[in-house]
Amino acid sequence: MNHSTWARLRLELRVVGIAAPATALVAPLAGAVLVTTLHAAGAGAADLDRAAGAVLAGLAPLGAAVAAASIVGRDPGAELVMTATAYRRVLFLRVGLVVAATALVTLLDAVAFHALKAWPAGQGTGGYVLVWAPPMVWLVALAVLIAVALRSSAAASGLIGGVWTAQLLMARDIRPHAVLRAQYLFLGVADRVPAHDWTVNRIALPAIGVAAAVAAGLLLGRPDRLLGSDAA
């Protein structure tokens, strides 16, 4: 990495501030402490598996999504950025920096949980990434799209939190329906699922995430629409 690139990244991190990275990282870090503590206390295998799955597929993606939503339009020099360069690239870079850091910590969590034998049922080493990455892509992309579309980071965080909670509480109603099951964040966390259902879910989640990111990018073709909103 050359000096100018590193300087640019440091600048973007300064603009993002500490709140967004802290929000994103607290979930996987606290989750690691929780699972390690349960393991040290002699918790049963089933309890460890559920805790690890909740951290990887639930808490880490939610933290990253809320942090991503908070970044939209939070640049105090937004007007200058919008006239000097494509704000779309700037925003995606900032979101990407925070999500990449969260992804790295979550991956380290996954490796540690597997070593502790705290691992969702039926998941092999492919779960190092597959357990958490599709839900994270789905939640982050939808959070950014909602924040841009509604011009409100707060509304996006609330809606994403609501969707996450609804999925958690309505698991029994979601799993029997093929379409809803394909967009279910926690599939395979609490129990084994057929390989076909798992494969469809792991493909469908990031596919919708990519579509949401593209839609957000199209809306950001007019970044001036963020000015004057509560996200600006």
Image (cartoon, rainbow, N blue to C red):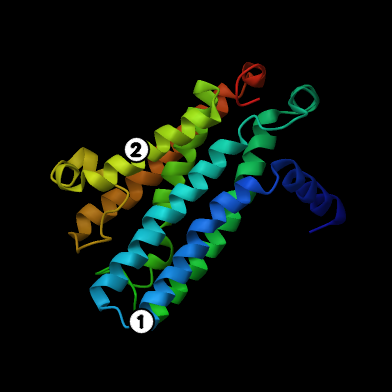
Which residue appears farthest toward the left when viewing the image?
Answer: 176
Q: Tell me the crowding category of disc 1: few under 14, some 14 to 19, or many 20 or more residues within 10 angstroms, Cα based.
A: few
- The residue that disc 2 covers is 163
Which quadrant does the N terminus fall into? bottom right
Q: Amino acid at mark 1?
A: Ala
Residue at (26, 54) in percent of width and height = 187
Which residue appears farthest toward the right when viewing the image?
Answer: 3
Q: Residue 160 placed where, x, y %?
A: 41, 37
Instruction: Tell whether label 2 touches label 1 (CB within 8 Å).
Output: no
Of labels 1 and 2, the one closer to you: 1
Quick check: 9 above or below 132?
A: above
Camera-side residue of 7 and 171: 171
Camera-side residue of 229 and 103: 229
Say the numbered circle drawn on residue 41: 1
Q: Say left or right for 221 vs 63.
A: right
Q: Say left or right for 11 vs 211.
A: right
Quarter of image, res 102: bottom right
Residue at (15, 47) in percent of width and height = 172
Label 1: state its secondary structure: loop
Q: Residue 80 placed where, x, y %?
A: 80, 25
Quarter of image, res 67: top right
Camera-side residue of 81 and 200: 81
Residue at (19, 43) in percent of width and height = 174
Kindly tell me whether residue 35 is visible in this rendering. Answer: yes
Label 2: state its secondary structure: helix
Q: Residue 97 placed where, x, y %?
A: 64, 50
Say the numbered circle drawn on residue 66: none
Quick check: 163 above or below 24?
A: above
Camera-side residue of 193 and 32: 32
Kindly tell me whether residue 131 is visible in this rendering. Answer: no
Q: Amino acid at mark 2?
A: Val
